[in-house]
Amino acid sequence: MKVELLTREGCHMCATARTELARICGDFGIGFTEVDVDRAAADGNPEVRAEYGDRLPVVLLDGIEHSYWEVDEPRLRADLAGRA
């Protein structure tokens, strides 16, 4: 199971999502990765910014968009519990 948070530097909603995701994933004993879409684009992967850059933060669960603009905590907890 892979949890990924797509963010952008200076995004206050991204900072909130990061804190919430750390708490939720911590409850399940799993980690998550964070990808700055602007940095990814500069490093040669512009697709991630083109796809998700207008609705950050975005939570991906196993590479599939799970939620955007905020962490859908009840849904994420249910989905993580179902995959554990």
Image (cartoon, helix red, strand yellow):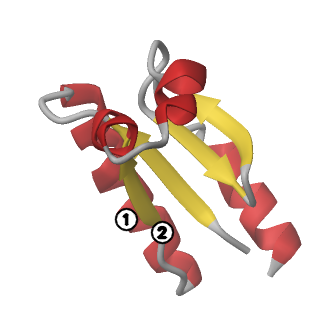
Asked if one can make out residue 11 in the rendered structure from this viewpoint, the answer is yes
Tell me whether circle 1 and circle 2 mark residues in contact (CB < 8 Å).
yes
Dot 2: within a 10 Å radius of its alpha carbon, few (fewer than 14), some, or many (20 or more) residues? some
Q: Residue furthest top?
A: 54
Q: Earlier in the sequence, mark 1 or mark 2?
A: 1
Q: Position of residue 36 (x, y in %)?
A: 32, 44
Dot 1: within a 10 Å radius of its alpha carbon, few (fewer than 14), some, or many (20 or more) residues? some
* Residue at horizontal 50 percent and vertical 70 percent from the top: 25
Q: Position of residue 74 (x, y in %)?
A: 66, 46
* Residue at horizontal 38 percent and vertical 36 percent from the top: 41
Q: Is residue 62 above or below residue 55?
A: below
Could you say which is closer to the camera, residue 74 or residue 52? Answer: 52
Q: Which mark's residue is nearer the viewer, 1 or 2? A: 2
Q: Which amino acid type corresponds to the residue marked 2 in the rendered image?
A: Phe
Image quarter where the N terminus lies is: bottom right
Q: Position of residue 76 (x, y in %)?
A: 67, 51
Q: Residue furthest front?
A: 44
Could you say which is closer to the camera, residue 58 or residue 36? Answer: 36
Which disc, if any, is residue 80? none
* Residue at horizontal 17 percent and vertical 35 percent from the top: 9
Q: Is residue 78 above or below residue 54?
A: below
Q: Is residue 33 above or below residue 74?
A: below
Answer with left or right where residue 38 lies relative to residue 68.
left
Identify residue for label 2: 32
Identify residue for label 1: 22
Image quarter where the C terminus lies is: bottom right
* Residue at horizontal 73 percent and vertical 66 percent from the top: 80
Asked if one can make out residue 73 in the rendered structure from this viewpoint, the answer is no
Where residue 11 sits, quadrant-wise, is top left
Q: Is residue 52 above or below residue 23?
A: above
**Label 2 element class:** loop
Q: Which amino acid type corresponds to the residue marked 1 in the rendered image?
A: Ala
